[in-house]
Amino acid sequence: MTVSRLGLVVHGGRPEAAEAARVVHAWCAEHSVSCTDIDVWRDGGRHSAGEEVEAAGNPDLVVTLGGDGTFLRGARLAAENDALVLGVDLGRVGFLTEVPVAEVRTALDAVREERLTVENRLLLTMRASRRLEVPEEMEALLKYGRGPLLPPPRVREDCEVDDEWGIPLHVFALNDIVLEKLSRDRQVSVGVYVSGRLLASYSADALLVATPTGSTAYSFAAGGPVVSPRAEALVFTPVAPHMAFDRSVVTAPDEPVGLRVLERSGRAAVSIDGQLRGVLDPGDWIGVYAAPRRLRAVRLGPTDFYGRLRERMNLTDAPAAVADGNASRLWSVTTPPPGDMAHLVLPTPSLEAKPEPTQGSAPGSAPEPTRGS
């Protein structure tokens, strides 16, 4: 592909991110590529994704320098402009970033020379019974120790609006959309609908709808399943529900999940990829469903998601299993797969060559999953 405009999202609190940014700027200068820093805190205010990508000259490649939280910001911008996104890893616990910081120049060369794979990731969007807004008194509280909030999601102009189907909001979520309680001493009561039909009414701390990408973030912390990021599905997970049925529900991508705040419930906050974007009153609702477009993430080689899962989640082997012997390689990678398996995603020599952790040992410190994982 031809990269002519590059947008750069940098974690401002990391010195190594600033150094990596200088490398990116130098590479762009060498190859006559326009490079613009996308500063989400510019002028002391927050801007919509549309405003940010417009200010950056509508980049066709967004590069993020930081951890998964920085990647989520860059993904929001890339989705807005249908651009590619490349994550350079400067984080400690994450699944989203692709390239070690020492290889940033090599990665940019690979993109320019088309030695890449584009991985399509499912995104969430939503409709609501009314526009999302954060009350002024709440915004003042949340500004303490933090930057200003993102502006309310704007209404999509290319979609029909009516009283029954609600207001289509210009939202793209890579991880999750969450409805959560506002009062510490009171749970939120919510009717949960799948494809418009009532599944159950929950009383819980929060209820979330995650993508497969977001299954290893907040949903995982709440006891949800790990889902391959290549899957097409929505994951509904209740957080600390006061009911016997506390399991996640995995729906097909064409089965929307609706969340209605019940009449006698307290108010509920709506967060999109960890960012507070609005407050709902009793009787209000949101409908969450797969967005018509996908995030186009740059991958420079096979993604070892399950190897990363073992490392990041500190998966250790059961002592009884270790006593029964080592887990050797399952399938050969020295010969082509048989015909009935040729269509499957199977190990490659490059992945198999990586040294595996010693059986029973901890490959790393146990992470604390967050919404930016």
Image (cartoon, rainbow, N blue to C red):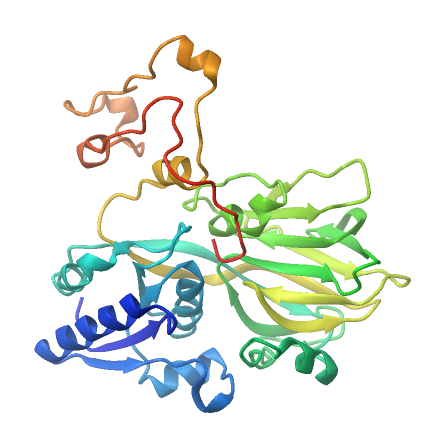
Q: Decide if residue 54 is in sight here.
A: yes
- Quick one: which residue is furthest to the left in this view? 30
The quadrant in which residue 184 appears is bottom right
- Quadrant for the N terminus, please: bottom left
Up/down of 139 relative to 316, above or below: below
Residue at 70% from the left image edge and 64% from the top image edge: 286
Q: Decide if residue 61 is in sight here.
A: no
Up/down of 82 relative to 224, above or below: below
Residue at 19% from the left image edge and 58% from the top image edge: 102
Nearest the eye: 221 or 247: 221
Left or right of 368: which side holds 237?
right
Residue 355: percent from the left, percent from the top? 23, 30
Looking at the image, how many numbered discs can be counted on the residues?
Answer: 0
Up/down of 368 relative to 23, above or below: above
- Quick one: which residue is furthest to the bottom in this view? 43
Residue 143: percent from the left, percent from the top? 61, 79
Residue 215: percent from the left, percent from the top? 52, 47
Left or right of 123: which side holds 29?
left
Nearest the eye: 130 or 51: 51
Residue at 67% from the left image edge and 82% from the top image edge: 140
The quadrant in which residue 312 appears is top left
Left or right of 84: which side holds 370?
right
- Quick one: which residue is furthest to the right in this view? 264
Residue at 39% from the left image edge and 39% from the top image edge: 364
Residue 13: percent from the left, percent from the top? 39, 71
